[in-house]
Image (tube, rainbow, N blue to C red):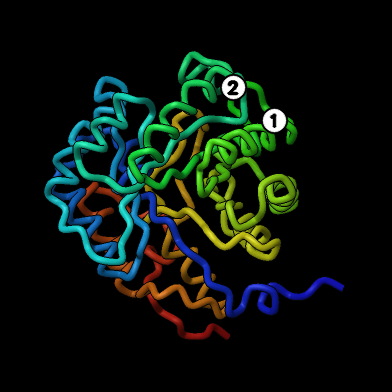
């Protein structure tokens, strides 16, 4: 008989990786001021979040929202005990990140050959070959390296992604020396059973302790998928304040799993994350107001009312 989620997860230490300042804001059509990005990061650290992905050192030509990456890090008051990883796509990005004084980076690739070819004009194997020297150089400089593997449950171009391809890519970035690998359902098509099966296959290859999950909420399945993976043993979850972000290739995509919705569920499971939920809801409302729209999170819309309904 399967144990209930409360029994299997209660008391566990779950680390939230906040990706809103990077993965969330990079998709904004309007230009977001550097000062707003810095304030968002600082508000999130005030909430008790201890891993906040700050920015991305990608080409401003392709991702203009991240053109101010150097200025964001220069203006940020970094706090003891808080990690500020940044995304880098290549050696040029790594050199900029090093000059900015980062101590952790993230790299990215996809488990879908079609997705890689469309986005970076490379096959899976070519993508891995390009990333290997970036990881090697970063580690030689003493940087921790995290990896994102996208399209683990579906691709907008090829549809289903074979589980063998997902595992092969995960094994490859693990072999490079990435300490943690985030498994991303880029277009949010996965369901709980699929998510658990995918996670367990990857864990059998590299160990559960090296894995994180990253779900988009396109079809409203992000929390269900996260819970299924928590029950299976994962203890690191990516989320974005206010549900910021999304995939431009998924029609109707509603963005990332909202950090405050995730935290509400974790609190209900008896998981102590050290994050202040009311302050997080306020941060979500603040950034949504700055962007001129309603927050995408359920909790942000209804607030902290915990009164019972009859």
Cα separation between marks 2 and 1: 9 Å
x then y, percent, for residue 259: 43, 60
118 relative to 26, above or below:
above
SS at mark 2 in the image:
helix
Residue sitting farthest toward the top: 121
Viewer can see residue 187: no
Q: Is residue 117 left or right of residue 59?
A: right
Return the residue at label 1: 165
Q: Residue at x 55, y 42 (%)?
A: 184
x then y, percent, for residue 145: 43, 43
Return the residue at label 2: 124
* Nearer to me, 221 or 105: 105
Count residues near mark 2 (Cα–Cα under 10 Å), then give few for <14, some for 14-19, many for 20+: many
* Nearer to me, 198 or 93: 93
Q: Residue at x 12, y 49 (%)?
A: 75
Q: Earlier in the sequence, mark 2 or mark 1?
A: 2
x then y, percent, for residue 295: 35, 55
Determine the image quadrant of residue 40: bottom left
Determine the image quadrant of residue 115: top right
């Amino acid at each position: 008989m399967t144990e209930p989620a409360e029994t299997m997860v209660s008391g566990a230490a779950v680390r939230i990786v906040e990706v809103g300042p990077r993965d969330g804001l990079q998709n904004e059509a309007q230009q977001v001021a550097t000062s707003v990005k810095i304030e968002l990061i600082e508000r999130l650290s005030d909430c008790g979040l201890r891993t906040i992905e700050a920015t991305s050192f990608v080409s401003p030509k392709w991702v203009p929202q991240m053109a101010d990456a150097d200025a964001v890090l220069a203006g940020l008051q970094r706090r003891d005990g808080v990690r500020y990883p940044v995304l880098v796509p290549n050696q040029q990005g790594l050199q900029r990140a090093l000059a900015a004084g980062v101590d952790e980076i993230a790299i990215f690739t996809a488990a879908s050959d079609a997705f890689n070819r469309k986005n970076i004009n490379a096959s899976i194997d070519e993508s891995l070959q390009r990333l290997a020297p970036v990881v090697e150089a970063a580690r030689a400089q003493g940087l921790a390296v995290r990896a994102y593997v996208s399209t683990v449950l579906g691709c907008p171009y090829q549809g289903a992604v074979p589980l063998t391809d997902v595992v092969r890519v995960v094994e490859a970035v693990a072999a490079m020396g990435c300490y943690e690998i985030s498994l991303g359902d880029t277009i949010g098509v996965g369901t709980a059973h699929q998510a658990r099966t995918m996670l367990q296959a990857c864990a059998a290859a590299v160990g559960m302790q090296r894995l994180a999950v990253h779900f988009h909420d396109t079809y409203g399945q992000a929390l269900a998928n996260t819970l299924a993976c928590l029950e299976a043993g994962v203890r690191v979850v990516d989320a974005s304040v206010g549900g910021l972000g999304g995939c431009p290739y998924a029609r109707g995509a509603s963005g990332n799993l909202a950090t405050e919705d995730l935290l509400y569920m974790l609190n209900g499971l008896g998981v102590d994350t050290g994050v202040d939920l009311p302050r997080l809801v306020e941060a979500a409302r603040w950034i949504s107001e700055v962007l001129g729209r309603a927050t995408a999170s359920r909790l942000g819309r209804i607030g902290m009312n915990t009164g019972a309904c009859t």
